[in-house]
Amino acid sequence: MKKIISTSAAPTPLNNLYSQGVLAQGKFLFTAGQLGVDPKSGELADGLRAQTQQALENIRAVLKAAGTDISYVVKVTVLLDNLGDFAAMNEVYATFFPESPPARTAFEAARLPIGALVEIEAIAIVE
């Protein structure tokens, strides 16, 4: 059993081939990779820190639409345009997960959609 999660508080998918989030078995939420796109303007935030902040805010919005919040995130995957930006991304990331952080994997990607510097996806529990 799966339920598609959609909210106007996060950017609209770039095409109709994926969902902002999928709730599986009513218990686990899988978010799509979120870029640092402002959902109101549709524009990519300026710079890595701003894009990281916005990507995590977009994840927060999808979590809220599914009835959960960032404290229930159990796994995060971060894709960076340049792994040299890891420390700067991590500074912003730490503000979202100050205690009991989720498991995380980070990769350098050859190229991200629309010229983004970071893309982040999450898996969370929904109670």
Image: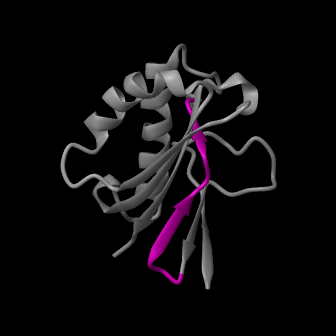
The reply, left or right, for residue 118 in relation to residue 102 is: right
Q: Give residue 95's quadrant in the image.
A: top left
Residue 20, compared with residue 107, is above or below; it is below
Q: Nearer the viewer, residue 48 or 26?
A: 48
Q: Residue furthest right?
A: 16
Q: Give residue 2's quadrant in the image.
A: bottom right
The reply, left or right, for residue 39 in relation to residue 29 is: right
Q: Position of residue 117 (x, y in %)?
A: 60, 25
Residue 24, compared with residue 59, is above or below; it is below
Residue drawn at (39%, 72%) of the image: 126
Number of labels in the image equals: 0
Q: Which residues are magenta?
A: 25-36
Residue 18, compared with residue 67, is above or below; it is above
Q: Give residue 11's quadrant in the image.
A: top right
Residue drawn at (74%, 27%) of the image: 114
Residue 48, compared with residue 25, is above or below; it is above
Q: Nearer the viewer, residue 115 or 19?
A: 115
Q: Position of residue 116 (x, y in %)?
A: 65, 26
Q: Nearer the viewer, residue 116 or 16?
A: 116
Q: Position of residue 118 (x, y in %)?
A: 57, 31
Q: How is the image coloured?
A: one colour
- Quadrant of the image containing the N terminus: bottom right
Q: Nearer the viewer, residue 79 or 37?
A: 79
32 magenta-colored: yes
